[in-house]
């Protein structure tokens, strides 16, 4: 396991986060078309002002990030070259420890079984499903809640 420094995002991180997001999506979201990736990438600059974004920094570079809104995990991505090294778990640990009293939730693309497995190993359980994603596109979402 690699130990990352978890810290708040800075403006200097924005370009690295967009590049990391795209690399991670291309590696794990094979159900998205190029047009879908361009569409969703357009939302990324807006997350910095609307979400609490934390960065996992490893050896001086952005290795992953998590964006939360209230008690909901809106986004969690780790660079694909760093998968299976504990960085995603460290990001989740930082989020959950910030307010362990209430249940945390996350929505996961049904077509991304690796992400579903990651969250279920952490202790999340399925509580629902939607046929469409938040933007109304036909990418079913699994709704999960953390049970500890």
Image: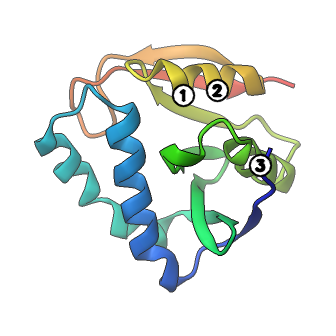
Q: Are marks 2 and 3 in contact (CB under 8 Å)?
A: no
Pinpoint residue 121: horizontal percent, then vertical percent. 73, 21
Report x, y in % for residue 58: 69, 64
**Residue at position x 49%, y 44% in the image:** 80
Circles 2 and 1, Cβ within 8 Å, touching? The answer is: yes
Which quadrant is home to the N terminus?
top right
Left or right relative to 138: residue 131: right
Apparent side of residue 101 relative to residue 82 in the rendered image (left or right): right
Inter-mark Cα distance, 2 to 3: 12 Å
Q: How far across and how far down the image is residue 55, in percent?
A: 63, 65
Q: Count neighbours of disc 3 (C-alpha within 10 A) and say few if under 14, some if 14 to 19, many if 20 or more.
A: some
Q: Is residue 44 above or below residue 126?
A: below
Q: Can residue 49 be seen in the rendering of this structure?
A: no
Left-right relation of 117 to 20:
right
- Residue 90 vertical position relative to residue 4 in the rendered view, above or below: above
The residue that disc 2 covers is 118
Where 119 falls versus 60 (above or below)?
above
Give the answer, above or below, for where 1 lies relative to 84. Answer: below
Q: Which mark is residue 115?
A: 1
The answer to which of marks 3 and 1 sits earlier in the sequence is: 3
Dot placed on the residue nearer the N-terminal end, 2 or 3: 3
Q: Can you tell which mark lies on residue 90?
A: 3
Q: Nearer the viewer, residue 125 or 16?
A: 16
């Amino acid at each position: 396991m690699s130990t990352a420094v978890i810290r708040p995002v800075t403006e200097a991180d924005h370009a690295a986060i967009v590049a990391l997001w795209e690399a991670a999506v291309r590696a794990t979201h094979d159900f998205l078309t190029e047009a879908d990736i361009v569409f969703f990438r357009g939302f990324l600059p807006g997350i910095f002002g609307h979400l609490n974004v934390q960065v996992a920094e490893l050896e001086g570079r952005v290795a992953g990030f998590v964006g939360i809104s209230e008690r909901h995990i809106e986004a969690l991505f780790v660079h694909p070259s760093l998968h299976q090294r504990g960085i995603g778990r460290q990001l989740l640990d930082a989020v959950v420890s910030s307010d362990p009293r209430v249940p945390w939730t996350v929505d996961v693309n049904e077509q991304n079984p690796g992400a579903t497995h990651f969250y279920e190993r952490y202790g999340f359980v399925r509580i629902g499903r939607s046929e469409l994603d938040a933007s109304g596109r036909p990418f079913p979402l699994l709704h999960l809640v953390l049970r500890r």
